[in-house]
Image: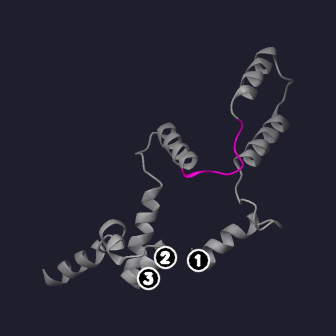
Amino acid sequence: MPLGPQAQAVLTPFLNADPTAVLFSPREAEEERLAARREAASAPLTEDARVRRRAADRRRPPGESYTPDTVRRAITRACRDAKVVHWHPHQLRHAAATRFRAEAGLEAARVLLGHSSPVVTEQHYAEVDRLQARDLMAKLG
């Protein structure tokens, strides 16, 4: 999928020399988080902390890349912890499809979403622009 200039600007700092490497690695994120935690620690590890660390070492290590399922689980956990209404990452796709359709039409939305038929785009992803309907009804009374 092509990326617009705003998305390119956000992602540019994360690009590295290897074009096949993932941009965001759970393994690297965990290493950075633990390094920052060690640096911020004001005292050496207690015996309890050592035991917890050994238990944590037995868990499955983070993967090299995020999957749709790991992103979904992280969002679910964050929504629960923040006590906000749960939302699903696929809602971003629906919102983008609606915006693509409103801005450039059904065919452009179909192409950007990678659908072979506009029927799928129209029925499942790009909702009718309700703001246009609201504005029209405001004019017509």
Residue furthest to the left in view is 141
Q: Which residues are magenta?
A: 61-68
In this rendered view, identify the residue nearer to me: 106 or 138: 106
Question: What x and y, as percent, mark residue 98?
Answer: 38, 72
Q: Above or below — where is 60 with respect to 139?
A: above
Question: Disc 1 vs disc 2: Cβ atoms closer than 8 Å?
Answer: yes
The residue that mark 3 highlights is 108
Residue 124, image quadrant? bottom left
Q: Tell me, yes or no, whether the two marked residues, 2 and 3, touch with CB atoms within 8 Å.
A: yes
Q: In the structure shown, which secondary structural element does the residue marked by tag 3 occupy?
A: helix
Q: Amino acid at mark 2?
A: Leu
Q: Magenta segment, principal secondary structure?
A: loop
Q: Nearer the viewer, residue 46 or 56?
A: 56
Counting other residues with Cα less than 10 Å from the Cα at mark 3, is it few (<14), some (14-19), or many (20 or more)? some
Which picture quadrant has residue 46? Answer: top right
- Above or below, 77 against 130 in this view is above
